[in-house]
Each structure stands twice: as structure tokens, then as C-alpha cells.
Amino acid sequence: MNLSSTLYTEYSFQIAFIWGRTLIDHTEYRAEIAAWLVDNCPAGARGPGQVANGSSKIELESDVAKWLEACVEQGLTAPTWPKEYGGGGLSNSEAKVFYEEMGKIKARSPLVGMGMSMIGPTLLEYGTDEQKQRHLPKIVRGEVQWCQGYSEPNAGSDLAALMSRAEDQGDHYEITGQKIWTSGAATADWMFILVRTDFDAPKHEGISFMLLTMDQPGVTVKPIQLISGISPFCETFFDSASALKEDLVGELNKGWTVGKRLLQFERSGIGGLSGGARPAQPGAGLVKVAKSYIGEVATDSTQTRILDPAIRQQVTTLNMNRSAFQLTAQRANEENKSGIPGAATSIFKLYGAALQQDGAALKRELMGFSGLGADNSAGFSDEELNTTSEWLGSKATTIYGGSNEIQANIIAKRVLGLPE
Ligand SMILES: Cc1cc2nc3c(=O)[nH]c(=O)nc-3n(C[C@H](O)[C@H](O)[C@H](O)COP(=O)(O)OP(=O)(O)OC[C@H]3O[C@@H](n4cnc5c(N)ncnc54)[C@H](O)[C@@H]3O)c2cc1C
């Protein structure tokens, strides 16, 4: 699969989420930003395709690079972040107008990734001024790609069981151990990592949250091949790797609190709450796919509908669920003026993941055997190959960012207050 389609698969949900928003009023700013978008968003940065993620190891198509540069100049890669860190300093409602106007011309997100959606917001809440000054401007300018060093071979759902350790060496921390399922590690420049710094404390209390560069002799990355044919994630080994003392985020041994908050940002992205991270949006265009593969029937001289009533019902149900979910996410955002909610993000993660899987499965099913292509040697189109790949890739949505069962546990305990 080529890079563009990989990135489209991963980030199209964000774009569709933006396209799906209800328009709000903000007349003067709207006119201004609409004109700016027409002038500054090149044709090659509209519709599906490559999206910048900050990696210094991935070459950007020229229109994508131009679009990124234009947004960086205006602080529009992170519209609501403070201007002093390179953000746009916009209010939430202005940012919303910006997204709505982007949606009208199908402008792609100028920049995505864990810097924007996970470590950036976490540093804004927990970083020192010095850490914000050092890391945030590079994130908003798309100069660094970040990866997440949380899971270990024996610490996934039970993340606090992690055993990678960091030892104080006076001027730096020395990190030894192994992480697994590290998305993007092969192209990332920096990692945020959870490490054990106190082996005698109860497991949640001896963990610290640090930042380290990937390009150093003590870090080795080995890609893992997936069922969908791509290798977006890796095993990462640390052999006396080094993290600067000033890259400890929050207090020593109090990293669990920081790490949990970052997970809420991650889950809100997956669930479409922040419009900030990933899943594919396979529901988009389902009617078109159904008409083309199943057939259509005229309802009057200008309109048609899906031929098979049972399939029509399936497509309509899925699209209605998608709309209801997007409206609920939008309402939750508006109710949370102070930003991304806490444990309630698990509700959106749980349902958003299921919706994504259902949509991917239905689209593949509508295509019949054409939705089961492995490569284009047998004449499958790019859209058909992408559909197969999205369907296989969607299997992971109920696992990454914390599995369904873990989200259900959080909802039961932290949202509903049920006994353990
Ligand atoms: C595509 C993808 C990308 C990922 N990217 C990253 C990344 O960038 N960085 C990173 O650190 N990690 C990443 N992960 C790892 C991910 O966070 C873990 O896979 C996930 O947390 C589950 O952990 P595990 O795989 O060890 O499964 P396990 O924890 O072993 O769970 C196995 C099964 O047991 C169930 N289970 C476990 N505990 C309980 C419980 N208490 N109650 C009920 N059921 C339970 C789980 O729900 C699951 O079904 C990624 C995973 C995927 C699939």
C-alpha cells in the first residue's frame, strides 16, 4: 500500500469529522478565513491523500508541504494552542469556524500525529514552561514525529505492571528494557515513555513519565508486520538509552497521573471527541459503494436508491448511528468548555471503535469478493484494496488505546461509580 493511502486510512476520520460538523455563526472571521483557505490550500491538499505527521524521515508531496507551511505561519496547525508556542490562539468557537470552512473545500488536516493529539495537550497541562517552550513549537511546525512507549510484552491492559526502568545517573536518566506495539517508532524522532523509577513502591506509584530522542545508540527499533500488510508498529529496545533530566514530565514516581491523562487525549482522538487523531471513516460514501456494487433503482426522474431493501436498511442504520455519534461528540465538546473530559472519554472510545469496525465490515461486504483484494495483480482497484486494508486495520480499533473490556471497566468504575 502506498504512503498516501496509509495515511488516509489512519487519519480520514478526523477529516470526515471536520466535514460532518454543523455550521455555527461567526460572520466576519468566517469570511476572512474562507478567503484565506481558498488562497492557501493547494488542490493537492484537498480530499483524500497524504497528511503530514512531522516525521523528518517521510518526504512530503509538494502541495502537502505548502499547505503545512501556510498553516504553520498562521498558527493553524494547532488553532487553539497559545500563540507563544506557535499555536493560533483562537477561541474554541473560532477554531470550529476554521474547521467548518476547511470542510467546505475538503481541505485535509495540515498536520496530525501523536505530537498534536497526545503529547502536545499533555505538555500544555503538565509540562514546565521550559518544556513547553522547547517541545511545543517543534510539534506545531511539524518538525518532529512522536511515538508512544507504553505497552510492554507483559504490560498491556495491566499497564502499571511495566518493567522498563530508568536510573538516575546524575545529569540524565539511563533507560533499559523493552516496549512493544510502538506505532510509528521506525519514523519517529521522539518518544514519550512510562518507566519504572521505584521498584519498592506499589506498582502505580513507582512510575515516571519521560521524553527521549529515538536517534541515539541505546534505542533499537524492529518493525512488526501486520495482517493488513503494513508495518506501522514496532518492538523498541532500550539498552542504556538516555533521557535528559529536564525531560522528566511531572514529578519523579508520579508519572501514572500524567500517563493516564495522555490516554484520555488518545481516547478522545479515537472516539472523535477532539477531532484530533485517527480511525478511518468507512461510513463515508457507503451509499455510493452500495449503488455501484449492488445496484440502484430510480425513485423519480432525478434520484435513485439502493436496489436491495435489506442492504438499504443496513447502510441507513449505520449512517444514522454515525450521525448520532458525531452529534453526541459535538455536544460533549461544547459542554466541556474546559477541554477534553476525563474518564467519560472511554464512552466515546468504546462506541467510536465499534462504529468504525461495523462501517469497515459493511463496506467490504458491499463489494463482495472485490473487497477481498491482497494486491493489484488481480485487477483490484485502489479503492477496493484500500477497503480490504481498512477492514483488516479496523480490527485493531477495539484494542489500541486500551481494549473494549478495559474501557467498559473504566466506564463502570469511574463514570457510573459501580462497585468493583
Ligand atoms: C494497532 C495498534 C497500535 C498500538 N500502538 C501502540 C503504541 O503506539 N504504543 C503503545 O504503547 N502501545 C500500542 N498498542 C498496544 C495496545 O495499547 C495494547 O495492545 C492494548 O492495551 C492491550 O494490551 P495487550 O495487547 O497486552 O493485551 P492484554 O492486556 O494481554 O489483553 C488480552 C485480552 O484480555 C482482556 N483483558 C485484559 N485485562 C482485562 C481485565 N482486567 N478485564 C477484562 N478483560 C481484560 C483484554 O481486553 C484483551 O481482550 C497498539 C496496539 C495496536 C493493536
Image (cartoon, rainbow, N blue to C red):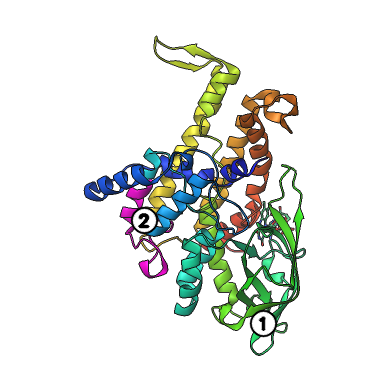
Q: With 18 as the anchor, is 38 left or right in this view?
A: left
Q: Tell me the SS state at disc 2.
A: helix
Real-space Cα separation, disc 2 to disc 1, in angstroms:
41 Å
Q: With 342 as the anchor, is 208 left or right in this view?
A: right
- In the drawing, what numbered circle is on residue 335? 2
Bin the neighbour count of mark 2 within 10 Å (Cα to Cα): few under 14, some 14-19, many 20 and up: few
Which x, y percent locates residue 276? 49, 53
Q: Residue furthest bottom?
A: 170
Q: Tell me the SS state at disc 1.
A: strand
Bounds of the magenta segment: 75-99
* Pointer 1 residue: 173
Q: Residue at x 52, y 39 (%)?
A: 48
Q: With 341 as the anchor, is 295 left or right in this view?
A: right
Against 222, residue 329 (above or below) is: above
Q: Where's ligand 1: which quadrant?
A: bottom right
- In the drawing, what numbered circle is on residue 410? none
Residue 88 among magenta residues: yes
Return the disc, 2 or 1, that comes first in the chain's sequence.
Answer: 1
Which x, y percent locates residue 394? 64, 43
Q: Residue at x 56, y 36 (%)?
A: 282
Residue 311 among magenta residues: no
